[in-house]
Image (cartoon, helix red, strand yellow):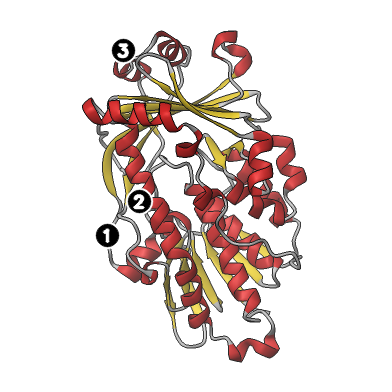
Amino acid sequence: MAHILVAGGGIGGLSAALACARVGARVSLFERNEVFAEFGAGIQLGPNVMRVLQSWDLKPALDQVVALPDRLQVRSALTGAELASLRLGADMLQRYGAPYATIRRADLHHLLVQSLQNRADVALHLDATVAGACQDTTEVTVQLSNAQAARGDLLVAADGAWSTLRQQLLHDGVPKPTGHLAYRAMVLQSDLPPTLRSQRVTAWLGPKLHVVHYPVAAGQWLNVVAIVHGQVRGDMSHWDHSANAQDLQRAMAMTCPQLRELIHAINAWRLWPLCIRPPMRGSYQHANGRVAFLGDAAHPMVPYLAQGAAMAIEDAATLAQVLHQAGALDGARAESAPVQKLLHDYARARWARNAHVQARAIRNAEIFHATGPLRWGRDAAMRLLGERLLDLPWLYGGGPLPLHNAR
């Protein structure tokens, strides 16, 4: 049985641990915090990632905590007028074989942790920071900050956008600021006036700003993200900064009354300066010898396509598939499937899709925040084409095929 090391206990690392354990690996996961905790707010889960999560037998747990919006609508932040909409609900299920869901990040993180805690083939190590790694032709070793070490057959580097392992192995610097600031909040729907409550995904587009909100926690809470242009001081690698509600209110002063009312109804905001890398240039950025980069460590994304967590989960599913299909987890066949070649296959299977999603997210930032003639053209195109622009078959219908003989 292969021994897989995982650096990072976020959604990507937990997904990798679960996917690989389900196909027969022994997994040791190292998380730097003393307890498993996930910060942030909400996540949109398109059909492409819901198919993966359901194939991991997580559907019953997901059904308890997701919301299932019936529609995605795009509105003008200036006038409030609807520009376009996309039917979700039964339409997504019929078209792509899985629903379009929204969830609190903490809820998804918690159910992944619960799934792993029930497995004898997974060891979860808390207060265990991976400070570095070394590898040879037979194994990979991680050095922990407490002077201990762990050895395995391969290492999954899921240690985030500011990955220590990526800096050590690829030497390509750190993510760069985009000049965009994301204000995030969650509010009980019952605390909002009835006119502000919503069970839909709504995106408000305005000059140099946009706001997205959607239900989470079975519809009881509303997740709100407002993105404006600006800079913050301090450590850019620490996403969770305190925020001044008045700063956001001033940025939204020219928007329509309904949007301003929603922004003014929320007092507690957290601030996230958006940083990014360019789209992946090749498979070499996804694997290095016995080390597989996964999620933000490989391809940090701006949230303009709502696919950051989804691509990490797809990475995990693809890695498990490559190992399973090559028989790398069967000791009798391990010699015919060297780990380095398998991770190269994983990298080749993932990098182009991740690069495409990264590029589309960057392009969407320009479209969402457009000014002048570009904004007028965007609005006209959305009114004319509607669902044809918002539906993304290449994205929602793509990704790894579920394994049905895992455990």
Evaluate if marks 2 and 1 touch, with contact meaning CB atoms under 8 Å apart: no
Identify residue for label 1.
173
User: How much space separates mark 2 and mark 3, taking CA atoms?
Assistant: 31 Å
Indicate whether 24 appears above or below 53. below
Q: Of marks 2 and 1, which one's residue comes earlier in the chain?
A: 1
> Identity of the amino acid at label 1?
Gly
User: How much space separates mark 1 and mark 3, taking CA atoms?
Assistant: 37 Å
> Identity of the amino acid at label 3?
Ala
User: How much space separates mark 2 and mark 1, taking CA atoms?
Assistant: 19 Å
Extreme residue in the front direction: 384
Identify residue for label 3.
253
Q: Residue at x 55, y 42 (%)?
A: 38
In this view, the mark in front (1 or 3): 3
Q: Of marks 2 and 3, which one's residue comes earlier in the chain?
A: 3
Q: Secondary structure at mark 2?
A: helix
In this view, the mark in front (2 or 3): 2
21 relative to 125 in the view: left or right: right
Q: Residues within 10 Å of mark 1 (few under 14, many from 20)?
A: few
Q: Residue 139: where, in percent of width, then height?
A: 51, 82
Residue 75, quarter of picture: top left
Q: Residue at x 65, y 52 (%)?
A: 51
Residue 187, quarter of picture: top right
Identify residue for label 2.
359
Question: In the rendered view of the protein, which quadrant contains the N terminus?
Answer: bottom right
